Structure formats: C-alpha cells, structure tokens
Image (cartoon, rainbow, N blue to C red):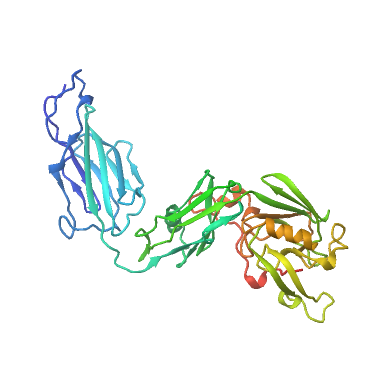
Amino acid sequence: MRTSPRTRTVVVGCTLLVTALGAGATACGSDGNPLADEPYDAADQISFNSPTGAGKKVDPDKPLEVTAEDGEGRITDVTATDSTGRYVAGELAADGSRWHSTSPLAADAHYTVRVSTEDEDGAPGRKVLTFDTSKPSTKKTLDVTFGPKAGQYGVGQPITADLNQPIKDKAQRAVVERALRVDSTPAADGTWYWVNDKQLHFRPKDYWPAHATILVHSNLEGVKVGDRLWGGKAKPLTLTTGDKILAVTDASAHSMTVYKNDALINTIPVTTGKPGFETRNGVKVVLEKQYFVRMRGTTVGISEDSSDSYDLPVYYATRVTWSGEYVHAAPWSVGSQGSANVSHGCTGMNTSNAEWFFDTFHPGDLVKVVNSNGHEMEPFGNGFGDWNLDWAKWRTGSALTNGKQDGPKPQDADRLRPTAV
C-alpha cells in the first residue's frame, strides 16, 4: 500500500506546461486497493509558458503535445476539444510517455484539455486545463458554399461543396474533408469526392433513404488548412428527400418503366435518340423542370441548312443534362413512340404522358437509360452523373482513403456532346 505521494510532471506543448500532475497524499480505499483512490488534483501546479509570456494566447500553428517526465507513471488518455465541441485528433505512445495532436488547432478558439495518468501502482491522476489560441496572422480564408438550395429533393440528389480557393495538396484536402459533415436520418453511409481543386460532391453508397432529413455543415472555421490559409465560415444546409422515384428507359425496347419506392407505377411508350444522336446510357438526376422551352438545332450545333435542323415549341420539359437532354412532350413523333428512335437525343412521349411525368418527377429524382448505342453519361460536368461510378471507384475520390484519385474528371462545357428534341 502506498503511504506517501509521488511527484509527476506532465509537459503540455503548444506553449503549455503542466509542471506536475497529481501530487498529494491519498489514503487507500477501504479494501486496501490504491485504485480506489480519487484521481490526483493538480490545480495549483499548472503553469502556461510561451514566447509571449504566461497566460497569453498560444500559436495555433504549433501542435499540442503532452509528455510524462521523470519516468514517473504514464499517460492513459488525453482529450482536447474546443468550445464548439470539435475534437483534436491525436496519438498516444504505446508506453504512455507522450501524446501529440495529429490534426490542426483552430485559430481564435478556446480549448479544454483533459489528461488522465496512472502511476506504477495504478493510482489515477487527472488534470483539466484550458487555453485560448490566437487569431491567424493572415486574413486569407477558405470559404465553403454548400448546394443545392435548401428544400426537398429526390433520393438521387448529390450534395455539392464549392470552395473559393483551390486545394491541390492531398494533406490539405484531408483537413478540409474531415471538417465537412453530412448527417442524415435515417443514416446513410457516404463520402466526399474531389471533382476538381475547388469542388466536392457527396453521395451515399446507395441512394438516399426516402423521406430522410440531411444536415450539411462545416467545422472548418478557424482551422489552418495550409500556409497562410485558414478555414472560413460556411452556411449550413438542410435537405429532405421524398419518395424514391426512378424511371428506366430501355432505348432498344422504346419503353419507359416508372417506379415509386421500387413498385411499378407506369409504363410509357417513348422514342429516344436516332443514329448519330443517341441518348446517353446511365443514371441521370433531374436538374430542373420547364413547362415551355423553345428548342432549336442551332443551340446544339446543328446548322440551319441541315436536314436535322429544327425549331420547335416543347412543353413539359424535364431536364436531365446541361447539354440539352430532356424528357418532354413530342406530339410530332407519336407514330414512332414505342417502335423507333427518331429524336436528337431527348426522350419523347405523347403530351398526356409528358404532363404526368412532369408532375411526378422533381429535382433529385432518377432517370436511367439502358440499351442505347450512345455514350455513357459523364460522372461530372454535364449534370449529376455521380451514380455512374461504383462505390469502390467513388471512394478513390476521397482524400481520406488510400486509393489514388484517378477517377473521371469533369468535361469542359464546350466539349459536351449536345442533345435535344
């Protein structure tokens, strides 16, 4: 049984020094077990040392480090959080001699550090200390804008994060990505994909659950991202999903089947892109709806003197690519719907069916095309083709995985193959 106190020293880096951790006599518990002792309270033995003097704000550029000195006991646990609840990641040495932070501290933040120790007899020591970090020396910030706008969407809607500064370094990308949080109820396993240096997309492994609530927010404010670059503010975003609505168009069968929550609700005869203008295969996400659109061949690169030229009023137009692919009313091709593909890339149907489709589908709902002789839908740059990457490929776009970021890159707008009508 221990009958006298043992002196311990715990040093906290990042301009912090704990000169002793738990020094004071304690009695054994009623069963003689020193583990029954209350943890040591070293409140009077804490000092803060920094280049600017004790009690001053510390430099967030420096890592946080906790060290047990003099071979007296070991560190068993360290937790560090700021006033908003953000945790500082860290690593504890196997022998308990040292703990150091592995994620950056935030600037202009208030931190609480809780250190637990035990001596060679197993008696516990504990110290809670606080400190403030200084403001960054630069005003350059990394701002994040989440999309789409708040509201209700279909289960295929990806989340976007647009950055005002390019981030190329993978370590810096990891800092950013860890701070961008997406939580859904019911829960959905998902991750971010770096589309380019200034944009990320987030999607689940599978589609979002129907009737889910999705909360998107950033913990990046005040966090150092790179040299002279600090995280800025970001407006949080709340989305909800409706029913799972999916249309599957079989281009070779000239037929569309529509499902609501995986139950078949309609079958529609359609026409898709003719040779040279084939409709893209793959999964597309509804982008917007327009009751009336004037479609001209010249807007998609077709010369006015060409036999393929057109200038038509189009109603009940549901857009699925930015380059001009719609699902819409096509009364001029009713004779071919269900039997031949005669469009310039859009999916056409009679006016009654197009009105039903227009009323049933909303942004974020899913339109899938199979058995077309066309190209595959681009994952990025022409709408939301995110779902055309399988989960293994999608995860390579995250800076928090070991895979190389070798996924598809967005196309330039002037290289997108145009389709319409």
**Residue 301: x and y, percent?**
73, 76
Instruction: Give coordinates of residue 201: x percent, y percent.
Output: 54, 57
**144 or 104: which is nearer to us?**
144
- Tell me: residue 47, above or below residue 380: above
Where is the C terminus found, in terms of image quarters? bottom right
Query: Which residue ends up furthest to the top in the rendered image?
Result: 31
Say if residue 174 shows up in the picture: no
Image side of residue 344 versus residue 221, left or right: right
Side of 161 where 311 appears, left or right: right
Give the vertical position of 352 relative to 78 (above or below): below
Position of 145 with respect to 410 (left or right) is: left
Where is residue 124 shown, x and y percent of the image? 23, 31
- Look at 19% across and 48% down and name the residue there: 17
Q: Position of residue 40 (x, y in %)?
A: 18, 34
302 is higher (above) or lower (below) than 39: below
Q: How many marks?
A: 0
User: Which residue is most to the bottom?
Assistant: 305
Q: Nearer the viewer, residue 173 or 377?
A: 377
Q: Is residue 415 visible?
A: yes
Residue 120 lies, with reference to residue 106, above or below; the image says above
